[in-house]
Amino acid sequence: MKSIGFLSFGHWAPSPGSHTRSGSDALLQSIELAVAAEELGADGAYFRVHHFARQLGSPFPLLAAVGARTSRIEIGTAVIDMRYENPMHFAEDAGAADLIAGGRLQLGISRGSPEQVVDGWRYFGYEPADGDSDADMARKGTEVLLEVLEGRGFAEPSPRPMFGNPPGLLRIEPYSEGLRDRIWWGSGSNTTSVWAATLGMNLQTSTLKFDETGEPLHVQQRKQIEAYIEAWKEAGHSREPRVSVSRSIFALTTDQDVAYFGGDRNSSDQIGMIDEQTRAIFGRSYAAEPDVLVKQLADDEAIQAADTLLLTVPNQLGVDYNAHVLENILTQVAPELGWR
């Protein structure tokens, strides 16, 4: 059994062929796709967060709305860039959205990726401390967030409060029990995977990773997952960790599928630079008839090592078509691989 969800970047553009032409379209269609995915039997609805872009931005209103419209499906992010986040506001917003959803949030966070503008976090009012990088700032903020989500009081109450307080130090409210165990770290390297395991976060791996060995992406990610699991065991955490892998997978069952994705049949991993110093490997897309996909996916070592698969969806093709994409995987591919 494998948990299967979708991951949407929420792209929108007023361009020919786009079914998602505005920010309103992106948000409302995201909610409708989550509802459709739950009806199809999918396990998760996940959303990517990008700032200064025609994509999904502030995540918590969307997560709360999806939580109010659904009853079973996990609702998550992959990922929220912690360079842009105040840990206290994050804890408040996340606690509220998680309570609305009945404890179904699965929040992926990370140090972020290249953005639309230079040092965009500065416009949000954040600066690394002297001697720190923006990545250091994100990780330190994450450590504060994790501490706050433990639910222990830390703030001194006013001697003349407007409302009565419980005894002792106060915590961020509303508090949602168990949310701390549903924080994931989006990791692009073995080192940060080990760091995430030490702090007791679940692990998210995407279709991009630092190229650390020159091997295919799925092999590097399998080794990354193994390093994470070993570090988790060494840290002595009491619960079992979760690991997700993101992939672009399209079962070609109609002429429309072939028209959209038939050209990806021979897709392969690509190498590129995500900044001046960092060489990265970008994962291939899978596009083939269901029986061929079954054989290809059985050879993907990272998918096999993970308990959760997130299917990246072409959201600008509309809710109905993306529901069709999900249904193809859930009914014609997943059962043959023992995932259902």
Image (cartoon, rainbow, N blue to C red):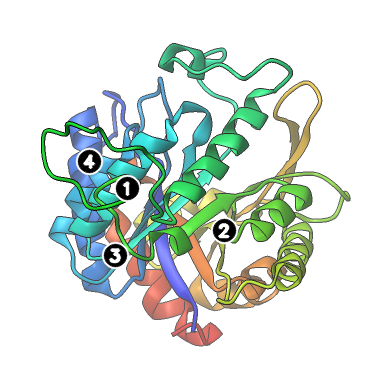
Spot occupied by residue 79 in the image (x, y as percentages of width and height) = 48, 44
Q: Local crowd at mark 3 within 10 Å, few (<14), some, or many (≥20)?
A: some
Q: What residue type is disc 3 on?
A: Gly
Q: What residue type is disc 1 on?
A: Ala
Spot occupied by residue 145 in the image (x, y as percentages of width and height) = 47, 44
Q: What residue type is disc 2 on?
A: Met
Q: Earlier in the sequence, mark 2 or mark 4?
A: 4
Mark 3 element type: loop
Q: Local crowd at mark 4 within 10 Å, few (<14), some, or many (≥20)?
A: some
Tell me what residue is drawn at x 57 percent, y 71 percent.
293
Residue 61 badge: 4
Q: Earlier in the sequence, mark 3 or mark 2?
A: 3
Mark 1 or 4, closer to the camera: 1
Tell me what residue is drawn at x 43 percent, y 42 percent.
48
Q: What residue type is disc 4 on?
A: Pro
Q: Nearer the viewer, residue 206 or 312?
A: 206
**Residue 238 position (above or below residue 134):** below
Asked whether the beta carbons under mark 3 and mark 1 sit within 8 Å of each other, the answer is no
Q: Nearer the viewer, residue 324 or 6?
A: 6
Mark 3, residue position:
103
Mark 2 element type: loop
Picture quadrant of residue 158: top left
Q: Local crowd at mark 1 within 10 Å, few (<14), some, or many (≥20)?
A: many
Spot occupied by residue 168 in the image (x, y as percentages of width and height) = 32, 50
Residue 171, can we see it?
yes
